[in-house]
Amino acid sequence: MQPPYVLAIDQGTTSSRALVVDAAGTIVGLGQQAFTQHFPQPGWVEHDPDEIWTTTIESIGIALAQAGLAANQLTAVGVTNQRETVLVWDKQTGEPLHNAIVWQDRRTAAICEGLRAAGHEDAVVRATGLKLDPYFSGTKLTWLLQSNPDLRRRAADGEIAAGTVDSWLVWKLTGGQRHVTDFTNASRTLLFNINRGRWDDALCDLFQVPRAMLPQAQPSRSLFGTTSEDVMGVRLPITGIAGDQQAALFGQGGFAPGIAKNTYGTGSFLLANAGPKPVHSPSGLLSSIGAGAGPTGPEYVLEGSVFVGGALVQWLRDELRLVNRSEDIEALAESVPDNGGVTIVPAFTGLGAPDWDPHARGAILGLTRGTTAGHIARAALEAIALSSAELLEVMDGELPNPVAELRVDGGASRNDLLMQLQADYSGVPVERPRNTETTALGAAYLAGLEAGIWASNAEVEALRETERVFEPQLSGAERHSRLAHWRRAVERTLGWATE
């Protein structure tokens, strides 16, 4: 018999990727295709749904070719995705009816403020674990339906499908046969009651979203459908789906409380397994459903979201042209012994936890005539590390047990200076795995467990290999001083965009 292989689709914010993973957890094929970012107005971010799909299919072809496999040699398919991005399409034709509104998009700030002013936030937080913020999917659907009366009418008549990116991909992969999502993605919409594990009619009414638009929600490990032969040339079971951050926690072996991971992508996302009960955070952290939720019982995660992480380095590369390649930022930052008094707060699209201010804007503080490109580069890496360190400090006060070790992944986790800064400012060891593709691996493991390739979480955990551990080198006093200075800088950016 041929060895089993899983296809993991990792549909991200700036590119679509596909990986072929074998039973040893080794990536034997990888394809990646970037796609266009659309910015129709300041604070608006959109993607073309058809380009999301075509780049996904192209990436699958590249991954299979690199692995030397045909689609009929695969055992199962797993999907992970940018979570809060939302799409709408015609149920009959499958045609998209608007560009995807991306998780970074801030156009619904006024809708959120109106609902907050009307006194709805406490009830929303209790039911969903989320804040009233443009980040989440629900108000994006509210805006789409308010801005297009014909869309609203057709949605009420059951003619339109809505969903996060996973729903769109499964619809396309199954030839329009399945309109589904998983619990992790559903729990990021503001429309899903995480205490009851189902869509909430009261929330749908509050956000004016017809229930008929929404997909069927089910556990991350379950059968979501079968690929169409017209699409893939073969019928393959889709047996695992999770939003990117929950998938990364699963891929990092975050199967029990006390384990935390931080993913460095476009943003930075700190998640810890919170166990079988949701943690309702007074500090603005988010509670969501974890990828392990299912027949064995509930699983919840506590999360802090930093909207701009790797995107800050991209900005220095593309707009300021300080470096030619993102990976060059480390050498530039190491060209100076410190930040020269410079602090960067990259609130390009507002701030997530713990401030939740869509009107915050980015700032570079402490500039002098002696400031160099090296100082700015170092301050940028410090901003990424400090943002997450502040969230970890808040999280430690709300979890049953503090985080003793931070597991890291994502592109920027390969930056040694950034990882050392993260350990210094967090005050805990930072563990980097040999394979940092943990988001895609999480999707592969979920699909493979359901398909019988792996028998248990323990078997999956045994596949993890640590490449390096970064130990904290700052004293506690120095660390707290640096975090206090960071907090001063953040407060100067709050409420800046008052329009």
Image (cartoon, rainbow, N blue to C red):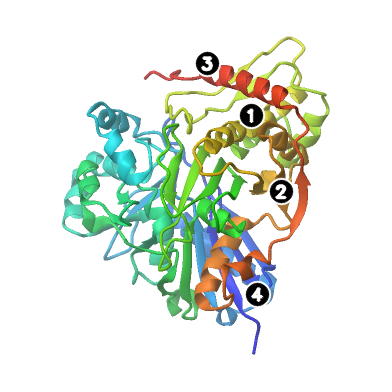
Label 4: how many Cα within 10 Å (few below 14, some 14–19, many 20+): some
The residue that appears at 56% across and 54% down in the rendered structure is: 249
How far apart are labels 4 and 3 at the CA level?
A: 50 Å
Does residue 159 appear anywhere in the picture? yes
How far apart are labels 2 and 4 at the CA level?
A: 23 Å
Looking at the rendered image, the quarter that the N terminus falls into is: bottom right
Q: Name the N-terminal-most of marks 1 and 4.
A: 4
Q: Name the N-terminal-most of marks 4 and 3.
A: 4
> Dot 4: what SS?
loop
Q: Measured along the vertical axis of the image, is residue 362 above or below residue 207? A: above
Residue 383 — which label? 1
Residue 492 — which label? 3
Q: Measured along the vertical axis of the image, is residue 326 above or below residue 345? A: below
Please state if 396 lies on the left or on the right of 49 as rendered. right
> Dot 1: what SS?
helix
How far across and down, in percent of the image, does residue 280 sit?
40, 40
How far across and down, in percent of the image, does residue 192 sit?
31, 51
* Residue positioned most to the top: 369
Label 1: how many Cα within 10 Å (few below 14, some 14–19, many 20+): many
Please state if 4 lies on the left or on the right of 230 as rendered. right
**Nearest the camera: 295 or 25?**
295
Q: Name the N-terminal-most of marks 2 and 3.
A: 2
* Residue positioned most to the front: 400
**Nearest the camera: 138 or 194?**
194
How far across and down, in percent of the image, does residue 212 sit?
22, 58
The residue that appears at 78% across and 50% down in the rendered structure is: 468
How far apart are labels 1 and 3 at the CA level?
A: 15 Å
Residue corresponding to mark 4: 23
> Dot 2: what SS?
strand
Please state if 327 lies on the left or on the right of 105 as rendered. right
Tag in front: 2 or 3 = 2
Residue corresponding to mark 2: 431
